Amino acid sequence: MTIVVAYKWAPNPQDAAVGSDGSVDFSRAKSAISEYDPVAFELARQVADATGAEVVGVTVGDASIDTSLARKAALSRGLDRLVIVADDRLAGADSTRLAAVLAAVVRGIGDVDLVLAGESSVDVTEGQVAMTLAGQLGWLGLNAVSSVSATDGGYAIERDVPSGTASMVLTGPAVLAATTDAVLSRVPGMKDILGAAKKPVEVLSLDMLDVSSAQVTLTAVSASRPAAGNRQRVIIDGSDPTAAAAELVGALRAAKVL
């Protein structure tokens, strides 16, 4: 049995530059494992330790995702091995294209019954790849998963829902997108990092995969900022805290905020 962790090697938005027109330049941003993904690594490792499963990391993107630093960053988080699709034809690929490539890799690995992923990617934050991947595989897809544990013949899952938490038992293959607080992610130590260099890595190109192509093209033609609201410019004298609080409440009610 094999558990796959689908993750993204992505630029950190904190390093991005924002232009006066609202455009975002990631050219100088340092890349790392998307901050939503470490929880998926940890969940996979915990389930694998309880079941004896193998944990395989999978990431896809352009050639820049395949570096020694990127490999060690992933392999030091509890993976048994790593599969990378590093192809410049995937530069700027949308979520549907990325999911199609991930699906082809998962099918090629074989004996996979569970794919774990973070709830979104730190750079794009669309939150679509995991569920699109489930659709590509023809598997069940669940997001907002806050707990996963092995049971006889399946998995016990807890999932955040608007009314609280839903508990369920899963049998059959599935793609699960975990919440950021599902589990406390470990910080790789020196032993983990040194051991990562000895773990197997397989690098694939698109030509090696049977990738289904969706007959859809999505092109961004424009972008605009939300209209700025009219500021009331109400100034409240704070010398008397009680009176200031009452005045603030009155102003908020007048503005129909309360």
Image: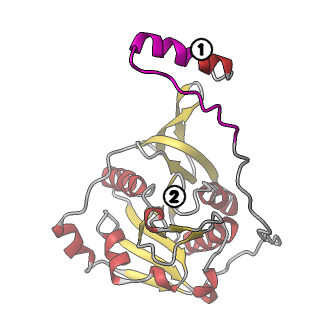
Task: Residue lying at the far right in this picture: please name it.
Answer: 215
Nearer mark to the viewer, of 1 and 2: 1
Report the residue at 45% width, 66% height from top: 12
Q: Which mark is residue 54?
A: none
Say above or below: 254 vs 171. above
The kind of residue tagged 2 is Val
Question: Disc 2 on helix, strand or loop?
Answer: strand
- 1 and 2 marks in contact (CB < 8 Å): no
Q: Residues within 10 Å of mark 2 (few under 14, many from 20)?
A: many
Residue visible at 46% across and 79% down?
65
Q: Is residue 64 above or below residue 74?
A: below
In the displayed structure image, the side of residue 118 where residue 253 appears, left or right: right
Horizontally, residue 230 falls left or right of residue 165, namely right
Looking at the image, which is closer to me, 129 or 246?
A: 246
Is residue 162 located in the magenta-colored stretch of the structure? no
- Residue depicted at 74% across the width and 58% down the height: 224
Quadrant of the snapshot with the C terminus: top right
Disc 1 residue type (three-letter) = Gly
Task: Let me know if residue 6 appears in the view.
Answer: no
Give the residue at x 39% y 83%: 67
On the image, the x and y values in percent for residue 175 come to 56, 54
Secondary structure of the residue carrying numbered label 1: helix
Q: Which residue is mark 1?
A: 250
165 or 256, which lies in front? 256
Q: Which residues are magenta?
A: 229-249
State the residue in front, 208 or 52.
208
Quick check: 186 left or right of 123? left
> Does the segment drawn in magenta span residue 241?
yes
Taking the view exactly as shown, the residue that stands out farthest to the left is 191
List the residue tagged with mark 2.
Answer: 115
Q: Horizontal placement of 71 versus 171: left or right?
A: left
